[in-house]
Amino acid sequence: MSDTDQVEDSAAPLIEHLAELRTRLIRAVGAFIVGIVLAFVVAEPILQFLLGPIEATLRDLGDPSPTLQYTSPQEYLFTLFRISMVFGFALAFPVIGFQLWRFVAPGLYRTEKNAFLPFLIASPLMFFLGASFAHFVVTPLAMAFFLGFADVSSIFANLLQGAGTALPEGAAIVPETGEGIRITFFGKVNESLDITLKFIMAFGLCFQLPVLLTLMGKAGLVSAEGLKSVRKYAVVGILVLAALVTPPDVITQGILFVVVYGLYEVSIFLVGRVEKKREAKLREEGLWDEDDDEDEVHTEDRGP
């Protein structure tokens, strides 16, 4: 066979793969567009749901009719479109994940398919769990801290001026003290939504940690002992992550650190179980090398 024939034979499978990739991408993008349209239809109820923690906090602070504003004609429309993008992707993810699976599955062995598919299912479930935790636990605490800070600061102002410690009427208002101007909260829709979506995305992605590390453990890229050995570096990394993705308050940063570090420990446990199952299977097949156990023992005896 000539070199030209070999090049043509190798080019044919590549063209087929590119055509397959093009088909999968078109279907995934189509599902994303449909998801955006469906989410836009119910974007207003979704917005009300996402802003629920802010509304509840304002009512607890004494505001009978919480109000948010927008200051440009296109702001509200773009806010609804942002919601449609995020939730449209969530609606389309099953189709996008299926197209991804259909593209990579032909190149996987049966055992690899059995290992990869559960993680494809677990990933959106863990993201939903993290997003729910952010919306129902973290966001209300953050809103109570930020909006309640005006009441706290007003107490100190009253104490300094001998006006007593009575809470001011109204929501998140620093009351008049006879001098200066009255400071009150007039929240913008897009900025308030931005905080909520950041919490949802941050915690949703952080909850992917056990899925990612367990999948890497199945592939042999990480080990339980390796994760334990870098635990102190992981603590520092999680602290930096908490400082970057959350507002500058100790409450939300502390919650994110505790949650992510807990997920890291869970990941170590899951990777350890994966390694034990792999070892048991190899022992049954007679493929396990006993020298591996001895090497591990000697490594533990030598210490770090």
Image (cartoon, rainbow, N blue to C red):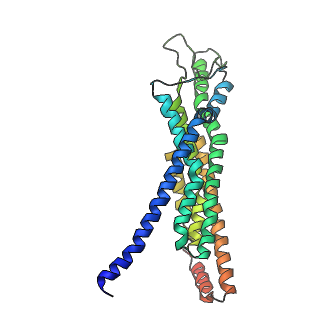
User: Where residue 247 appears, x then y in whole percent?
Assistant: 53, 40
User: Where residue 146 appears, x then y in whole percent?
Assistant: 58, 32
Image point (63%, 52%), residue name: 259
Image point (56%, 37%), residue name: 40
Q: Is residue 282 left or right of residue 14?
A: right
Image point (59%, 73%), residue name: 112
Q: Nearer the viewer, residue 246 or 100?
A: 100
Q: Is residue 98 above or below residue 246?
A: below
Q: Is residue 37 above or below residue 60?
A: below
Location of the N terminus by quadrant is bottom left
Q: Nearer the viewer, residue 190 or 98?
A: 98
Image point (67%, 85%), residue name: 283
User: Where residue 84 appears, x then y in whole percent?
Assistant: 54, 40
Q: Nearer the viewer, residue 87 or 153?
A: 87
Q: Quadrant of residue 139?
A: top right
Q: Is residue 298 above or below residue 194?
A: below
User: Where residue 68 appears, x then y in whole percent?
Assistant: 56, 25
Q: Is residue 126 above or below residue 295?
A: above
Any part of residue 243 in sight: no
Location of the C terminus by quadrant is bottom right
User: Total marks drawn?
Assistant: 0
Q: Quadrant of residue 151?
A: top right
Any part of residue 52 in sight: yes
